[in-house]
Amino acid sequence: MANYYNIDDILAEEEFVPVVFHKAANGVVIDPSSETNSVEQGAKVELPLWLAQELYLRQAISISVPACFSQRTRLEIQADAACVDLKSRSPYFYEFGCKIAPLVGDKTIEILLLSAFKIRYKEILTKAYTAVFTTTSKFLTLLTKEETNLYEAAQASMAAFKKWRMGGPRLQRASVLGRKRKPLD
Amino acid sequence: MHGRKAYELVKEFASGEKGHLKIFNNELFERVIEECNEHHNALQSLIRKMQEEGLEVQTAKNADHYGALVHHLSLTRNKRCLMAYVYNRAEIIRDLAWKVGLLHELPSEIQEKFGDSEEQYFKDHSKSLKLYMSQLSLDVNVDMVPPKDPYIKVRVLEDLGSGIILSDKSANFARHSMHFLKRTDAEQYISRGLMEELTG
């Protein structure tokens, strides 16, 4: 597993997917509607992806398309991808989509992700280079984790370019100590 | 829910600013380990039950098998979260040693956030770095880009007193005083925020 220690990968796998159990399972508390400590055959529950993935590979469950890739989302993305609030759907929209697509056998998810990312990518970079912070703060709340990283990278490169052009001190306080200086006592 | 606590632990790590350390969450960490033990016990009792029924544990695919499987997966998931938490923190701690300073040079408000084993890790890492540098008789922690001028102008931001002896001179480093120092000497004070470089 290449991403074993990757924090984002771990968080992306915590997204919930609707599943149907084909096999019963004893001694586990994952079905909230069940009164006993077990899952019946045919029970419909929501499981985090990391669990659903492995159970699916052992043919214990079948997975259906999660709510964040619903028809409504698709229509919104088709209308104007740049304005869709993907973060509220899933902060790991793309990673989650890539992981879930082969499991549900839905080829359209991949096309959806690609087209959404293409349009939003352009928008993010334009905003990162030109807009002032006050106008972008609202826009930033719509971005997924991946897109936020992209936005920050673009801004950092812009800042580095400005610094290179204007000149300035090469040595600086380590960023881990925080940006603000301690108040003078 | 399975793996929820472990998720909270990782989430907490991710919620901070990049490269910043939070206080080691001992309580939650212990809870996740406890949960691992619970999963382990449940897994064992299910397998025992299968054995008592005279089933082949490797091949029988009944409800107990899938129950045990879920516990097993939850266990490995919890393990992964715990490992990632410790691993990523260790990475930050190593970074601190390189970027800010070794041993006592690190500000105490950062050191307070270390867990017990992390404190030891930081000390050991600092020590081996120091040993390595003294064997090479070279400070490998300075800026990689060769300076145009070996001397730079700095302003002192916090009262450092006159106790510091640099390689070629000693002076009274009172707050707001300005000095002309060797860059390699000044670097560590700048990165700790005690001096700033002046350009002009």
Image: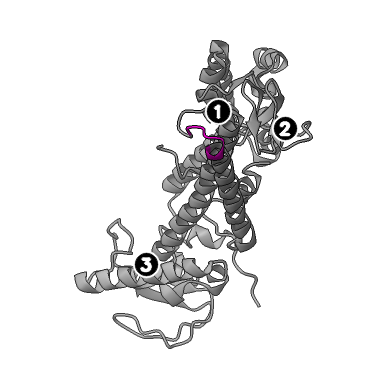
Q: Nearer the viewer, residue A121 or B132?
A: B132
User: Which numbered disc flags the more N-terminal residue, 2 or 1?
Assistant: 2
The residue most toward the left is B136
Q: Nearer the viewer, mark 3 or mark 1?
A: 1
The dominant secondary structure in magenta is loop
Asked if residue A102 lies left or right of residue A26, the reply is left
Residue position marked by numbered label 2 in the rendering:
A31
Asked if residue B190 lies left or right of residue A40, the reply is left
Asked if residue B99 lies left or right of residue A97, the reply is left
Residue position marked by numbered label 1 in the rendering:
A55
| Point 62% across, 23% down: residue | A23
- Magenta residue span: B51-56
> Residue A76 lies in magenta, yes or no?
no
Residue position marked by numbered label 3 in the rendering:
B125
In x, y percent, where is residue B113? 57, 66
For mark 1, give the secondary structure: helix
Q: Within 10 Å of the Cα at label 1, are there few (<14), some (14-19), or many (20+) other Cα atoms?
A: some
For mark 2, give the secondary structure: loop
Dot 3 amino acid type: His
Give me the C-alpha separation between circle 2 and circle 1. Answer: 15 Å
Dot 1 amino acid type: Leu
For mark 3, give the secondary structure: helix
Q: Within 10 Å of the Cα at label 3, are there few (<14), some (14-19), or many (20+) other Cα atoms?
A: some
